[in-house]
Amino acid sequence: MIQLSEFLPPRPESSWKLIRQVGVDNVVGVLNGGEQDQRMFASVGSVGWEIEDRDEVPWSLAALRHNKELYEQWGFKLIATEDTAPMDKIRLGQDGRDEQIDQFIEQVRALGGLGVPTMAYNWMAITTWGRTDTALPDRGGALVTGYNRAVQQANPALLPEGEVTAEDMWSALEYFLKAVVPEAEKAGVRLAMHPDDPPQSMDRGVPRIMSSVANFRRMLDIVPSDYNGTTFCQGNFALMPEVLAGETSIPALIREFGTAKIPFVHFRDVKGTPESFRETFHDAGQTDMAACVEAYHSIGFDGAMRPDHVPTLEGESNSAPGYETLGRLFAIGYIRGLEHSAYGHPAARKA
């Protein structure tokens, strides 16, 4: 079966009981005060998820053990992390990257020691996922996030154009993978690269190299290993040029990459193109989601999967766009139904 999971900070919230009640007992965690924890909602201007009592070294064994034990107190099992020590010097190939690589390796070893099998990361320097609107009206008045490239690129540059080139970032990625993948193999922790969000070749002077299927194939070939894989974020792959041109599809990519290259899935969908798109309810986007789950079943996928970027529903504040509670509950039920249709109901498999 799929390890249906939710994305939770290491600070209990009112949603935790609801998530357990609808049948999710796996967690994809963030670090307490780590890079994702600090920047994720800042990127969309949210005031949600205040960070308190930061761990001094949130990627250390002691901090991660504390997080794991906290989740366990609530009945959750930590099966992946989606947050890292700072990485921008690594991504940009700057002085100081070796120290940041050492911190990354420290986290990999800590996760291995705790039996956490997957560590997601990304190659988006300076900013993470980009949205230009966090309250677009959708079905029944629900609110979704969206992106308009012209609006975003009118904002101040993040770097002077040409200061860092795409090939600079490829060189930095090769340097990084050759250092960390052998350590991940030793630790038994599968690394999972998230696509650029949105998938575009440049964002205000910063190259984005994880924005096409061809570039993911190139990344996977740098250090061929089951421990060098993808966070298969369906919403981002759906906006990549090869998919939009009809050269491949999300189900076809699932079968191409297989379980060897997909340790972790973000199950979400969109409508539009990289220049202008919006998030959608999981049953209302441009991807055949049932065919995707059939493809996961066909490759024997049994890794972590979580819903991502859900709509904000009636009665919710939208203080954490994409991560309010009611949309998560809808998505969890939708995924579970597709899973039982493709994989079979657990009771039937036991019979």
Image (cartoon, grey):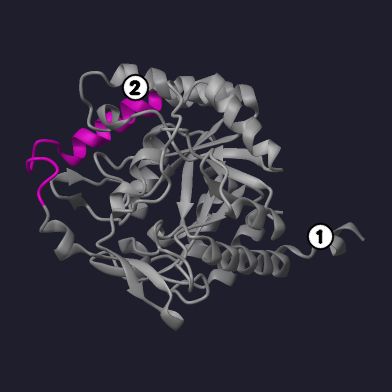
- Residue 68 placed where, x, y %? 62, 32
Front one among 290 and 125: 125
Judged from the image, the secondary structure of the residue bearing numbered disc 2 is helix
Report which quarter residue 340 is drawn in.
Answer: bottom right
| Residue 301 image position (x, y, % from top left) | 64, 52
Q: Is 53 on the left-hand or right-hand side of 125?
A: right
Q: Nearer the viewer, residue 344 or 72?
A: 72
Q: Residue at x 71, y 58 (%)?
A: 21
Instruction: Report the amino acid beneath label 1.
Output: Pro
The total number of labels drawn is 2
Magenta-highlighted residues: 156-178
User: Quarter of the image containing the N terminus?
Assistant: bottom right
Mark 1 crowdedness (10 Å alpha carbons): few <14, some 14-19, many ≥20:
few
| Foreground residue among 115 and 303 | 115
> How far is disc 2 from disc 1 in space, using C-alphas?
43 Å
Residue at (62, 38) in percent of width and height: 78
Kindly tell me whether residue 269 is visible in this rendering: yes
Q: Pointer 2: what residue?
A: 100
Residue 54 screen position, x and y as percent: 44, 29
182 in relation to 71, above or below: above
- What residue is pinned by disc 1? 346
Identify the mark at residue 155; answer none if there is no mark. Answer: none
Magenta-colored stretch includes residue 175: yes
**Considering the numbered disc 1 on the image, is that residue within a helix, a strand or a loop?**
helix
Q: Please provide percent x and percent y for residue 113.
A: 62, 21
Q: Is residue 248 magenta?
A: no
Residue at 15% across, 64% down? 151
Which quarter of the figure is the C terminus placed in? Answer: bottom right
| Label pair 2/1, CB-CB below 8 angstroms | no
Residue type (three-letter) at the residue carrying disc 2: Gln
Within 10 Å of disc 2 (Cα), the crowding (few <14, some 14-19, many 20+) is some
